[in-house]
Amino acid sequence: MVQHSTTIQQLGEGTVQAVCSCGWRSPVFGADKRTGTMDPLQHATEAADLHEWEMSLRLARACRRL
């Protein structure tokens, strides 16, 4: 079983990226000014939350098969 632990990394000049211990990386947020008024940190946090949620669903499906 892979443990998923996400962190938010600041890349400089207002850009951030969510990174997981499994190797998953979100897009870089903050580099593109067309993303609207949401804070890049909020985008990265939501991406990390979604990744962890998706991985928990996959784990639940795998456990049911056992």
Image (cartoon, grey):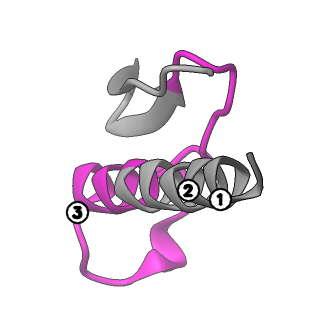
Instruction: Say which residue appears at 71% left-offset and 50% top-offset.
Output: 62
The answer to whether residue 28 is magenta is yes
In the picture, measured across the screen, residue 66 lies left or right of residue 44, that is right
Instruction: Say which residue appears at 45% left-offset and 48% top-offset.
Output: 52
- Disc 3 marks which residue? 39
Choose top left, top right, bottom left or bottom right for residue 7.
top left
Amino acid identity at mark 1: Arg
Q: Earlier in the sequence, mark 3 or mark 2?
A: 3
Residue 11 in the image: state x and y as whole percent. Answer: 44, 21
Spatial separation of the CA atoms under disc 3 and disc 1: 38 Å
In this view, the mark in front (3 or 2): 2
Start-end of magenta stretch: 20-48
Viewport quadrant of the N terminus: top right
Viewport quadrant of the C terminus: top right
Residue 24 in the image: state x and y as whole percent. Answer: 67, 32
Please give the label number shown on residue 60: 2
Amino acid identity at mark 3: Asp
In the picture, measured across the screen, residue 53 lies left or right of residue 26, that is left
Spatial separation of the CA atoms under disc 2 and disc 1: 6 Å
Amino acid identity at mark 2: Ala
- Disc 1 marks which residue? 64
In this view, the mark in front (3 or 1): 1
Q: Is residue 6 above or below residue 2?
A: below
Mark 2 and mark 1 residues within 8 Å of each other at the beta carbon: yes
Mark 1, Cα crowd under 10 Å, few <14 / some 14-19 / many 20+, is few
Q: Earlier in the sequence, mark 3 or mark 1?
A: 3
Which element carries disc 3, helix, strand or loop?
loop
Instruction: Say which residue appears at 49% left-offset and 52% top-offset.
Output: 56
Instruction: Say which residue appears at 40% left-offset and 36% top-offset.
Output: 16
